[in-house]
Image (cartoon, helix red, strand yellow):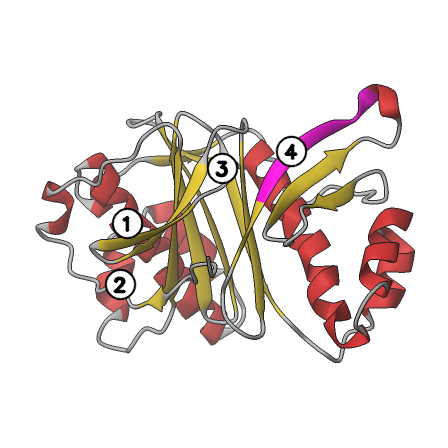
Amino acid sequence: MEKAQVIFQQVPFETDGAWRSPIAIHHDDVQVWGITLDVTDSELPRAASVLSHDERGRAERLISEGHRRQSIAAHAKLRLILSRYCGAPPGQLAIRRTSDGKPFLSDYPSIRFNLTHSHGRALIAVARDREVGADLEQVRREVDVVRLAKRFLSERDLAFIEDGDPAQRHERFLKTWVAREAVFKADGRGITFPLHRDYLELTGDETKGSLVLGDTASDQRKRPVRFLSLGPGWIGAVAAEGTDWTVTLCNGSESQINRGT
């Protein structure tokens, strides 16, 4: 079966009504939303109006106007989507941060989430009672990925990147990267150096695998990762606690299910 693809969609900034119809999410389900971060001048005030004081402050500290707009859009759309799970208005959601900086919903602790965005696109992963992380990256052909892999990654990852079609080296490098980002975000710590202690272990079709943590057999742990089909030029992945979960790709009121193991 062909792998379902994430559809990057516009999320309107209407703040009334939608939250009154909560989305059901089960413990074995990780729901992933792909969104675009385009925001017009007329939409920007409405987007900013649902943000907390801290969220607006972090956006205002960004030097680039484009980055400020995308930060506001990303966090406003995150709130709009989370409001559909909590059954509460987006501006009333209390989003706090742990001591490691991982955001959480203080009034709805069973709803776990992660936001990642890059170059005008974002992924939002939502789960119930299990930590979750996601990452997406745009393929940049000008980057010397072999040099980066030799400097930072494990020998196993370097071999994976150099094997096969040279035209796919950037995609393979980014698979090793987004897998680490997704797992580390689920853990609440973000990318953690050094990276050579861990390596990516893939299934035959490379749609899923595990990030193997630890450089000795005695302390190795495997963390499952699901890779997302994002269309040409993009690589993305999602990770979550445990192994008994599948991924649902959300598209407005409709969903496509990409089953994991």
- Depth check: give the residue in front, 192 or 91: 192
- Label 2 vs label 4: CA separation? 31 Å
Q: Position of residue 250 (x, y in %)?
A: 32, 53
Magenta residues? 219-225
Residue 215, disc: none
Which residue is identified by label 4? 223
Say which of marks 2 and 4 sits in front: 4
- Amino acid tagged 3: Val
* Vertical relation: 43 (above or below) 55: below
Residue 224 lies in the magenta stretch? yes
- Amino acid tagged 1: Ile
First in sequence: mark 2 vs mark 3: 2
Q: Residue at x 15, y 60 (%)?
A: 14
Which residue is identified by label 1? 81
- Label 1 vs label 4: CA separation? 27 Å
What SS does tag 1 mark?
Answer: helix
Which residue is identified by label 2? 11
How would you rate the neighbour count of disc 4 (Cα within 10 Å): few for under 14, some for 14-19, many for 20 or more?
many
Say which of marks 4 and 3 sits in front: 4
Q: Are marks 1 and 2 in contact (CB under 8 Å)?
A: yes
Confirm whether residue 20 shows in the render. yes
Residue 182 lies in the magenta stretch? no
- Amino acid tagged 4: Arg
- Amino acid tagged 2: Val
Q: Residue at x 56, y 29 (%)?
A: 99
